[in-house]
Amino acid sequence: MTDFDAIVIGTGQSGPALARRLIGAGQRVAIIERGRFGGTCVNTGCTPTKTLVASAYAIHTARRGADYGFSTGEIKVDMKRIKARKDGVAGASNRGVERSLKNLKNCTVYEGHAHFTGPHEVAVGSEALRAEKIFINVGGRASIPPIPGLDQVKYLTNSSMMEVDFLPRHLVVLGGSYIGLEFGQMYRRFGSQVTIVELGSRLIPREDEDVSQAVAGFLAKEGIEVQLNAKCLGLTKRGDDTVMALDCEGGKREVIGSHLLIATGRRPNTDDLGLDRAGIKMDQRGYIEVDEQLRTSVPGVWALGDCNGRGAFTHTSWNDFEIVAANLLDGGDRKVSDRIIAYALYTDPPLGRAGMTEAEVRKSGKPALVAKIAMEDVSRAYEKGETEGFMKVLVDAGTKQILGASFLGTSGDEAIHCVLDTMYAKAPYTVLQRAMHIHPTVSEFIPTMLEDLAPLS
């Protein structure tokens, strides 16, 4: 048994940063990684996918050359070079995380699968480790639904898509939310025929209906087929193709594709950690139960990142690290409930989101005001020739504080931070309304639209 002051299981966004803070406080730390250093974001999530999105955007812009006054001739897409560029960007991040940890003084790196043998004891291969403080940062993976026939066909996930270096003839995407929409649009721009299949009545059902409709609209303009209300799925092979049946009764609606991407959500990597032997509680979906300071049911054990069910983003994982580090090392009293929900969907144009949706505001019964402006009325968007989408802000009519916002449009993923920072400051919307923003930008229209707030009817 080797004793440490702290053990960190997983090298995703929060794990390495926390290890560095603990070591800086004079503690001896063991950090364990069974796969690729850097976790989902670096290897199969944010970094590689946004690199692919950038390639798809460049290809799409080149095809629109005539709109901007130039011609390029035939656009030839080289998927091997696109993948190589992605691998280069993601690989640098992966190697950087591994190198920094292995060169970190008072940090011992173990490569292998970790599992609990007791509340404060962990085994890695033949090694037995013990620490009074253990931090679980094991991330998540694609959730595969129980579809009849799925075991008879080949399919891709967001992880295996990272190995694709060819152009699928017809990519069928099961799941009309964030992962599915990003991959669907990028592969359409690479040149694949794309069909997106969604079980619900509209795309990205957690967003407002106007957002769903606008996204469906610009995807349709690019030639992406969307099949909604796919209530009864079944999969079979037909030659080299995969056939997805969408209805059980009342017709034979089906989609035939060369490749299938399953993008129906994520699940935590907690099923093989031996959490029961440590007495660490999980919910019915396998997420580790934590309190407001990310402490598990076992004293001295914390869970950070995707495995705790308190956020599914790189930035929420990083915020988890900040909460734990502040409370343990800085005498802080930070809580998960202090943060405001915020995220982005990286279609083109992107969606930036903060706080409550319009549907949530209506459900809350709060007297509210709303302001909305079409991106075609934003001069910066018009000048760029990227006018799809809109910006919408919701305000509490009583307190005048901003309740939430949806920015679907060019630079929406950046401009949303004007609203988010105002919300964190708990300032009335009038502070943002009276701010002088730079022209010409997308953000400059936020004060302008706030002048037109009207009751949410």
Image (spheres, rainbow, N blue to C red):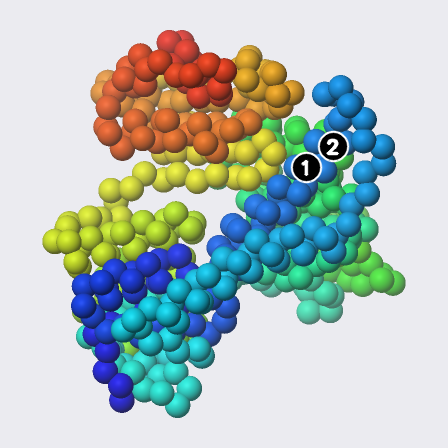
267 on left or right of 185: left
Judging depth in this view, the residue of 262 and 313 nearest the camera is 313
Q: Can residue 282 be seen here?
A: no
Residue type of the residue flagged with mark 2 = Ala
Characterize the local packing of mark 1: few (<14), some (14-19) or many (20 or more) Cα atoms within 10 angstroms.
few
Percent of width and height locating residue 11:
40, 65
Q: Secondary structure at mark 1?
A: helix
- Quadrant of the drawing holding the N terminus: bottom left
Establish if 149 lies above or below 404.
Answer: below
Which residue lies most toward the top here? Answer: 451
Q: Residues within 10 Å of mark 2 (few under 14, many from 20)?
A: some
Q: CA distance from mark 2 to mark 1?
A: 6 Å
Q: Residue at x 45, y 31 (%)?
A: 414
Left/right placement of residue 389 relative to residue 399 reads right
**Labels 2 & 1 near each other (Cβ < 8 A):** yes
The residue positioned 50% from the left and 68% from the top of the image is 36
Question: Badge 1 is on which residue?
Answer: 58
Residue position for label 2 = 62
**Amino acid tagged 1:** Ala
Residue extending farthest to the right is 239
Query: Quick check: 437 above or below 231?
Result: above
Residue drawn 37% across and 9% down? 451
Q: Which mark is residue 168?
A: none
**Residue at 77% across / 62% down in the picture?**
236
- Does residue 297 lie above or below 182 as drawn? below
Residue 244: x percent and y percent? 74, 54
Left/right placement of residue 313 relative to residue 217 reads left
User: Which sits in the foreground, 58 or 331?
Assistant: 58
Measuring from the top left, give residue 176's x and y in whole percent: 60, 44
For the C terminus, which image quadrant?
A: top left
Disc 2 on helix, strand or loop? helix
State the residue lying farthest toward the left: 331
